[in-house]
Image (cartoon, helix red, strand yellow):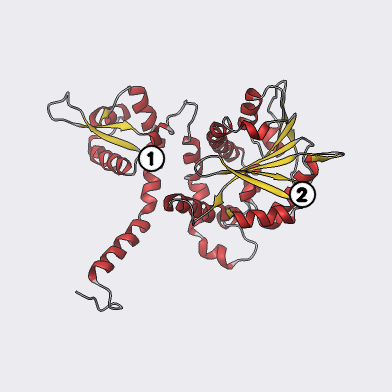
């Protein structure tokens, strides 16, 4: 049966409505995830050593009896979204449902080597994500970053003024770095022949420490804002240096830009890359710049992966940055004076790009 709306079938309209409602209520997915991290549920299940029943979970959390049903609703949504697995506890007569960890929720167990809970806490903090209510204002006002619509200044200025949020942000970046480090362990070819490397925007040194542990003969400098590195102590082959990457970058055989360039406009990226080029170019010797960032490839990658990258492309616009496809990356490299580049896989989301002067 046809509808009076543009001659659409009723089934098409109902499907469109479902898609609309799915996106309209998508924030509930994010808030449910935030709730599970705030309640430390992945860690509780991990420490329990086996799937935990609803009654055990609410007992540990000391949930009022009037809210038990709401906990179950949240857990069922999270399970449907892949964060938990619902299993039946055969030992109980009533076969009470229980919840087990999945690979995804294992990444939220606090105290483990690979824990992304700080990323969830940072990204979903109200102080940061309230800006996303202001797309309209941001779009109409020139030179206004999305964060500035709610924070009153850009992110970096806000972090410099607010130590607690600076810590929250740095913890989030450090947790993400551990995921990248997992990939770097299989990238020996990147570090072959290098005596020194500078990790620009290296934060508290999570990646730098892994590089130094894996390659003890390689000298690593973690280079970041003075506020970030001022109280950090290095080791035999790891040092911390404060500075501004727009002014100069310490000299080395290689410069690492891990998830840095996507924060900046094309014009700023070219400035940064030129400083990095100066850092790896000395008399008679030319090193390389190593970029770890997203490369959008809609024609060759799975739809779900592209969707995440496009979501990140909108998200990073809060800093006036962008995610780029290969042609956009190539344009930056050439305009910054580099002659060649090579792209290799790194993680599911990120690629490793070696660029040469």
Lower position in the chain sequence, tag 1 or tag 2: 1
* Residue 322 found in image quarter: bottom right
Q: Position of residue 273 (x, y in %)?
A: 73, 48
Could you tell me which secondary element the residue under label 2 belongs to? helix
- How far apart are labels 1 and 2 at the CA level? 43 Å
- Return the residue nearer the eye: 14 or 70: 14
Residue occupying image coordinates x 71% and y 42%: 289
Q: Position of 14 compared to 132: left or right? A: left
Residue occupying image coordinates x 32% and y 23%: 48
As drawn, the residue found furthest toward the right would be 283
- Return the residue nearer the eye: 228 or 210: 210
Q: State whether residue 179 appears in this view.
A: yes
Q: Give the residue number, with chain letter if any, for mark 1.
A: 35
Give the mark count: 2
* Residue 277 found in image quarter: top right
In this view, the mark in front (1 or 2):
2
Image quarter of the N terminus: bottom left
Residue occupying image coordinates x 32% and y 30%: 61
- Return the residue nearer the eye: 183 or 115: 183
Q: Give the residue number, with chain letter if any, for mark 2.
A: 274
Q: State whether residue 204 appears in this view.
A: no
Could you tell me which secondary element the residue under label 1 belongs to? helix
Q: Where is residue 203 in the image (x, y as percent from the top left)?
A: 64, 36
Residue occupying image coordinates x 73% and y 41%: 288
């Amino acid at each position: 049966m046809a509808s009076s709306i543009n001659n659409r079938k009723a089934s098409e309209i109902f499907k469109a409505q479902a898609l609309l409602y799915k996106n309209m209520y998508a924030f509930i997915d994010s808030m449910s995830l935030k709730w599970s991290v705030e309640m430390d549920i992945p860690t509780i299940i991990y420490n329990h050593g086996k799937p935990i029943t609803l009654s055990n979970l609410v007992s540990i959390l000391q949930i009022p009896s009037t809210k038990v049903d709401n906990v179950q609703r949240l857990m069922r949504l999270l399970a449907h979204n892949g964060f938990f697995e619902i299993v039946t506890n055969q030992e109980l007569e009533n076969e009470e449902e229980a919840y087990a960890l999945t690979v995804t929720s294992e990444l939220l167990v606090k105290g483990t080597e690979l824990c992304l809970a700080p990323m969830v806490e940072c990204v979903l903090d109200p102080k940061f994500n309230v800006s996303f209510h202001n797309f309209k204002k941001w779009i109409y006002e020139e030179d206004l970053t999305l964060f500035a619509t709610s924070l009153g200044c850009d992110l970096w200025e806000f972090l410099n003024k607010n130590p607690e949020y600076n810590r929250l942000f740095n913890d989030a970046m450090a947790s993400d770095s551990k995921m990248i480090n997992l990939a770097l362990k299989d990238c020996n070819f990147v570090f072959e022949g290098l005596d020194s490397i500078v990790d620009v925007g290296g934060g508290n040194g999570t990646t730098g420490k892994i590089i130094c542990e894996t390659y003890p003969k390689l000298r690593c400098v973690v280079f970041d804002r003075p506020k970030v590195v001022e109280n950090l102590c290095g080791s035999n082959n790891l040092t911390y240096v404060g500075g501004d990457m727009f002014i100069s970058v310490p000299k080395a055989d290689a410069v690492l830009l891990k998830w840095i360039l996507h924060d900046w406009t094309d014009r700023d990226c070219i400035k940064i890359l030129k400083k990095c080029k100066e850092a790896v170019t000395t008399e008679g010797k030319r090193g390389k710049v190593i970029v770890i960032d997203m490369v959008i490839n809609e024609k060759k990658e799975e739809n779900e992966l592209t969707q995440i990258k496009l979501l990140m492309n909108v998200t990073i616009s809060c800093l006036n940055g962008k995610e780029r496809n290969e042609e956009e990356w190539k344009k930056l490299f050439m305009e910054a004076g580099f002659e060649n580049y090579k792209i290799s896989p790194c993680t599911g989301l990120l690629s490793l790009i070696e660029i040469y002067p």
